[in-house]
């Protein structure tokens, strides 16, 4: 049996996977997500002598990394943790994407990087529970996640962080047979992320090589956190039947940071999860088709829908390939009106000989709309909103 908690992470993501032997935290939402929700569960695990086997930071985005920043800023070090032991952290940052910088940075170029770092994290990562002082991680305001991982002495991407976690990585947890099989990002997507960073450096007048190093590692993450989001198209075509469908509305995601997301298949105690982060549907489909060609089942016990249910990240082709009795949709709907109703309808309109349950960590207009939807295939489904408790996934769920 596997238990999953989908935390109230506002418009972000934070999931804790917990079995008798394995405990994995995937993203952390915002700092307040950690303070108000994740922290208590980690203290409980630690009191039982448990550790976090793996933390996965799927990509550099404020609504995914804030809670992890907060956790590492208060957890001490890998050898002397104050909250919970952490066996390994996956995080693709500049250190993972390029070689160390072997050139001394001239003073004027150093000043450019300092200006980026002095700006620090976005305001959304500095709020407090009280809301009075915008400084929740003030002591670590100049620290990127990469710096916190390195300074804490944590195992980083299976070593010192110089190797990226990318498609094809298969990780077997050392103490059991649980497996994490990485679907995305491809090495090409990671190079796209690096190219985006280099383009920004050129624009601000930085002329040195963009190799890894302490001050430039910080600047890499702070830049990506502050980059403007790719605007999501709002135009929706209408099908001949007069209803909006996913086939009509789907357009591929263009966000380079989303394209760098770590998505993966988790096999924990025989329970199979498809956790899609904010990944691009086309890249996920490519990896899944390769696995399907090897005889791997595309039927899962649960699927976490990509990018908070955006119709830019769940394609008709992806839904034709995979299915599950349980779906997770994480968002409060405060950005881009996620989740998109076309995605939700496309999930439940498919024929199935089993009932589906859609779990939402908030009630949104779209979750309310799908509650009253009649499946085009008369498939049975249930909608559960404000799902804040542990959800059990397994053969006898």
Image: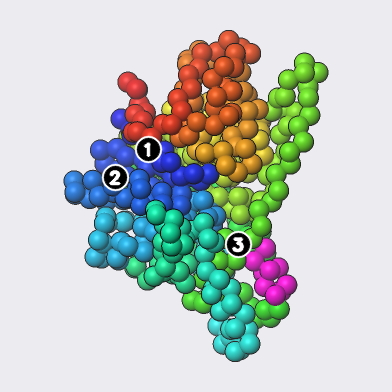
The label shown at residue 62 is none
Q: Give the quarter of the figure containing the C terminus.
A: top left
In the rendered structure, does residue 291 fall within the stretch colored magenta?
no
Real-space CA distance between mark 2 and mark 1, rounded to the nearest whole angstrom:
10 Å
Q: Quadrant of residue 348?
A: top right
Q: Are marks 2 and 1 in contact (CB under 8 Å)?
A: yes
Q: Which of the marked residues, 3 or 2, is nearer the chain's N terminus? A: 2
Q: Quadrant of residue 309?
A: top right
Q: Is residue 287 visible?
A: no
Coordinates of residue 61 in the picture (x, y in percent) = 55, 55
Label 1 CA crowd tier, 10 Å (few <14, some 14–19, many 20+): many
Give the residues in magenta: 196-204
Q: Give the quarter of the figure containing the N terminus.
A: top left
Disc 2 target residue = 41
The colour style of the image is rainbow
Q: Residue at x 67, y 73 (%)?
A: 201
Q: Which of the marked residues, 3 or 1, is nearer the chain's N terminus? A: 1
Q: Residue at x 67, y 63 (%)?
A: 196
Q: In this rendering, is residue 199 above or below 157?
A: below
Element type where label 3 sits in the image: helix
Q: Using the image as rendered, state which of residue 171 and residue 388 is in the foreground.
A: 388
Disc 3 target residue = 226
Element type where label 2 sits in the image: helix
Q: In this rendering, is residue 194 above or below 58?
A: below
Q: Are marks 3 and 2 in contact (CB under 8 Å)?
A: no
Disc 1 target residue = 5
Q: Residue at x 46, y 44 (%)?
A: 9
Element type where label 1 sits in the image: strand
* Nearest-to-viewer mark from 3 and 1: 3
Q: Which of the marked residues, 2 or 1, is nearer the chain's N terminus? A: 1
């Amino acid at each position: 049996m596997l238990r999953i908690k989908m935390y109230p992470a506002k418009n972000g993501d934070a999931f804790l996977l917990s079995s008798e032997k394995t405990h994995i935290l995937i993203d952390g939402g915002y700092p307040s997500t950690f303070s108000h929700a994740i922290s208590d569960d980690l203290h409980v695990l630690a009191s039982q002598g448990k550790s976090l086997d793996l933390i996965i930071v799927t990509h550099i985005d404020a609504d995914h990394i804030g809670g992890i920043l907060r956790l590492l800023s208060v957890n001490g070090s890998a050898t002397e943790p104050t909250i919970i032991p952490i066996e390994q952290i996956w995080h693709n940052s500049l250190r993972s994407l390029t070689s160390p910088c072997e050139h001394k940075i001239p003073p004027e170029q150093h000043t450019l990087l300092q200006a980026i770092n002095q700006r620090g994290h976005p305001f959304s990562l500095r709020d407090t529970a009280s809301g009075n002082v915008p400084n929740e991680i003030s002591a670590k305001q100049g620290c990127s996640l990469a710096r916190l991982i390195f300074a804490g002495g944590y195992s980083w991407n299976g070593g010192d962080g110089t190797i990226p976690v990318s498609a094809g990585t298969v990780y077997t947890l050392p103490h059991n047979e649980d497996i994490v099989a990485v679907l995305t990002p491809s090495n090409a997507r990671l190079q796209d992320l690096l190219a985006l960073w280099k383009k920004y450096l050129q624009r601000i007048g930085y002329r040195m090589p963009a190799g890894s190093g302490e001050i430039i590692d910080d600047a890499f993450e702070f830049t990506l956190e502050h980059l403007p989001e790719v605007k999501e198209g709002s135009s929706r075509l209408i099908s001949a039947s007069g209803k909006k469908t996913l086939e009509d509305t789907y357009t591929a995601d263009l966000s380079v940071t989303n394209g760098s997301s770590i998505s993966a298949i988790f096999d924990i105690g025989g329970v199979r999860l498809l956790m899609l982060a904010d990944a691009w549907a086309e890249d996920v489909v490519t990896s899944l088709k390769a696995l399907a060609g090897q005889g791997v089942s595309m039927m899962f016990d649960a699927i976490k829908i990509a990018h908070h249910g955006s119709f830019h990240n769940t394609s008709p082709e992806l839904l034709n390939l995979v299915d599950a009795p349980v779906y997770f949709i994480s968002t409060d709907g405060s950005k881009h009106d996620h989740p998109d109703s076309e995605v939700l309808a496309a999930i439940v309109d498919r024929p199935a000989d089993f009932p589906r349950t859609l779990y939402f960590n908030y009630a949104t207009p779209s979750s309310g709309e799908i509650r009253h939807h009649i499946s085009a295939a008369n498939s049975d489904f249930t909608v559960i909103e404000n799902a804040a408790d542990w959800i059990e996934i397994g053969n006898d769920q």
